[in-house]
Amino acid sequence: LKSPSPSSDKVIRVMQSNRRTDTIPEKKIRSALFKRGYRFRKDYLIKTVGTKCRPDVVFPRKKVAVFVDGCFWHGCPAHGTWPKSNADFWRVKIENTKKRDNDNDCSLRETGWMVVRIWEHEIPEEAADKIAEAVRISDG
Ligand SMILES: [Zn+2]
């Protein structure tokens, strides 16, 4: 599978935003949590049976892992767009990401983690509500 040259400004922008740095939605969600008094880790590596991953927000003692998923890369049903040029390349890429997400979720859950998935399009305060609820009910 060889990487096509970016075909449109939109694709270029999406590709550039696929960095290992914080995205704006991640930052907003972290600061919403922080303001509510939650303390958590970012860049925390979880090594468990079947997976090794770095969720965007981790509550290690509570065993709650939060992923903030980009609409494009993770194939959001509301606004994941499927680029028309190089369609096969992108389809495979996005499908692989979704499969990896799913594998990670399964391995984490099997080893006692609670997994929260947030779409980048979600309102940060609502995302924080979801995370707070997961932390509250987790028995970790
Ligand atoms: Zn979306």
Image (cartoon, rainbow, N blue to C red):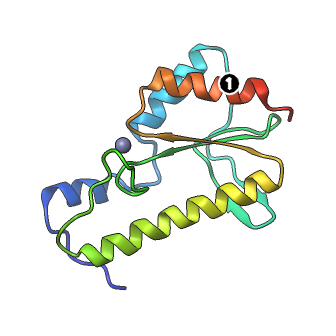
The quarter holding residue 41 reads: top right
Residue at image point 62% right, 46% down: 43
Q: Is residue 80 above or below residue 127?
A: below
* Ligand 1 image position (quadrant): top left
Residue 81's place in the image compared with 119, above or below, is: below
Residue 74 lies in what quarter of the image? bottom left
Q: Pinpoint residue 67: horizontal percent, then vertical percent.
A: 57, 45
Quarter occupied by the C terminus: top right
Nearest the eye: 114 or 61: 114
Residue that label 1 marks: 133
Q: Residues within 10 Å of mark 1 (few under 14, many from 20)?
A: few
Rendered location of residue 73, percent (x, y) = 39, 57
- Residue farthest toward the right in the current orientation of the protein: 139
Q: Position of residue 2 (x, y in %)?
A: 32, 84
Give, as a three-letter code, the residue at label 1.
Glu
Which residue ends up furthest to the left in the rendered image? Answer: 8
> Measured from the top left, where is residue 99 in percent x and y?
54, 66
Quarter residue 90 falls in:
bottom left
16 on left or right of 114: left
Label 1 residue SS = helix
Identity of the residue furthest to the top in this view: 36
Q: Is mark 1 within 8 Å of ligand 1?
A: no
Horizontal side of residue 40 vs 11, given as left or right: right
Q: In percent of the image, x 83 and y 36: which residue is there?
A: 61
Quarter of the picture containing the N terminus is bottom left
Toward the bottom, the furthest residue is: 1
